[in-house]
Image: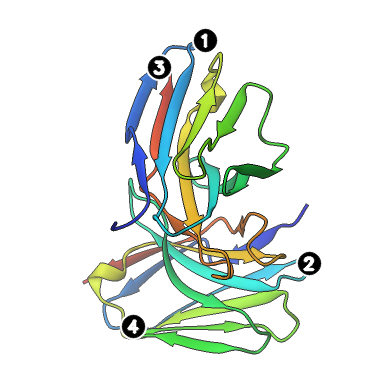
């Protein structure tokens, strides 16, 4: 089946630093999404990407859909304490008529 | 309607008991998904509804699991004869047709089987 490799598994950074994380896949996806999850809560959608090469921003977050359609990255600029959480990439092959395949997450920890 | 609602938030049950979870999607969303998430992992797809029709089921959905969406609005997920390995967070998500893949998740139901 499809698998997503997400890295790094965890990041310990200082407040104000920029963060970069990525996902790679063994197969092609038509859509890439990035979610953030906090303890005891469901994932919250951050950014959705629909076209190969697409670069999309949401505030301090920027994500790109890789040109090969097998990878995506998420950058967070000038991190703040509320950025702490687990960030998941997710890919979808169809147009919403099938489930998302998730990575294992990147755990972001920020030291003040 | 502020988002996807799941009930209960937490459930502790003894092994062998049956449990049922409910999900109320965002009102204008006709697509509804169930996922399971275990500690340290991302969510894993279980099943998908478009309106009241269950269109896809993962191989993770054993015969002890059944999901329904009788009127195309809320959905229930039932687990019969629970096992310790069923302990997980069960997440519901919804999206609207034509909304691409933008699925919005509820807060989940945390199941602990003792």
Asked whether disc 2 touches disc 1, contact meaning CB atoms under 8 Å apart, the reply is no
Where residue B52 sits, quadrant-wise, is top right
B75 or A33, nearer to the observer: B75
Which of the labelled discs sits on residue A17, or is there none?
A: 4
Protein image colouring: rainbow
Q: CA distance from mark 4 to mark 2?
A: 32 Å
| Image position of B69 with respect to A81: above or below | above
* Residue bearing the label numbered 1: B16
Going by the picture, which residue comes out furthest to the front?
Answer: B71
* Residue A22: x %, y % from top left: 57, 73
**Residue found 65% across the figure and 63% down from its top:** A5
Q: Are marks 1 and 3 on the same chain?
A: yes
Q: CA distance from mark 1 to mark 3?
A: 8 Å
Q: CA distance from mark 4 to mark 1?
A: 49 Å
* Residue A51: x %, y % from top left: 65, 84
The quadrant of the picture occupied by the C terminus of chain A is: bottom left
The residue carrying pointer 4 sits among few (fewer than 14), some (14 to 19) or many (20 or more) residues within 10 Å by Cα, namely: few
- Mark nearer the viewer, 4 or 1: 1
* Residue bearing the label numbered 3: B13
Q: CA distance from mark 2 to mark 1?
A: 39 Å
B103 or A46, nearer to the observer: B103
* Residue B101: x %, y % from top left: 58, 66
* Residue bearing the label numbered 2: A27
Chain letter behind tag 3: B
The residue carrying pointer 3 sits among few (fewer than 14), some (14 to 19) or many (20 or more) residues within 10 Å by Cα, namely: some
Q: Are marks 2 and 1 on the same chain?
A: no
Going by the picture, which residue comes out furthest to the left?
Answer: A112
């Amino acid at each position: 089946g499809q698998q997503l490799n997400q890295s790094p598994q965890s990041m310990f950074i200082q407040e104000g630093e920029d963060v970069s994380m990525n996902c790679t896949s063994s197969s092609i996806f038509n859509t890439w999404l990035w979610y953030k999850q906090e303890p005891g809560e469901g994932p919250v959608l951050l950014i959705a990407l629909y076209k190969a090469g697409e670069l999309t921003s949401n505030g301090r977050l920027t994500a790109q859909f890789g040109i090969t359609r097998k990878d995506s990255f998420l950058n967070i600029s000038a991190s703040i304490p509320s950025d702490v959480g687990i960030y998941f990439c997710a890919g979808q092959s169809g147009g919403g008529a099938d489930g998302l395949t998730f990575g294992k997450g990147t755990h972001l920890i920020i030291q003040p | 309607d502020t988002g996807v609602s799941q009930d209960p938030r937490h459930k502790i049950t003894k092994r062998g008991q049956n449990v049922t979870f409910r999900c109320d999607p965002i009102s204008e969303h006709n697509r509804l998904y169930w996922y399971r998430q275990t500690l340290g992992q991302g969510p894993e797809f279980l099943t998908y509804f478009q309106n009241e029709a269950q269109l896809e089921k993962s191989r993770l959905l054993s015969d002890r699991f059944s999901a329904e969406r009788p009127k195309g609005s809320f959905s229930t997920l039932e687990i019969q004869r629970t096992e310790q390995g069923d302990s997980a967070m069960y997440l519901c998500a919804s999206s609207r047709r034509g909304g691409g893949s933008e699925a919005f998740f509820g807060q989940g139901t945390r199941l602990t089987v003792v």
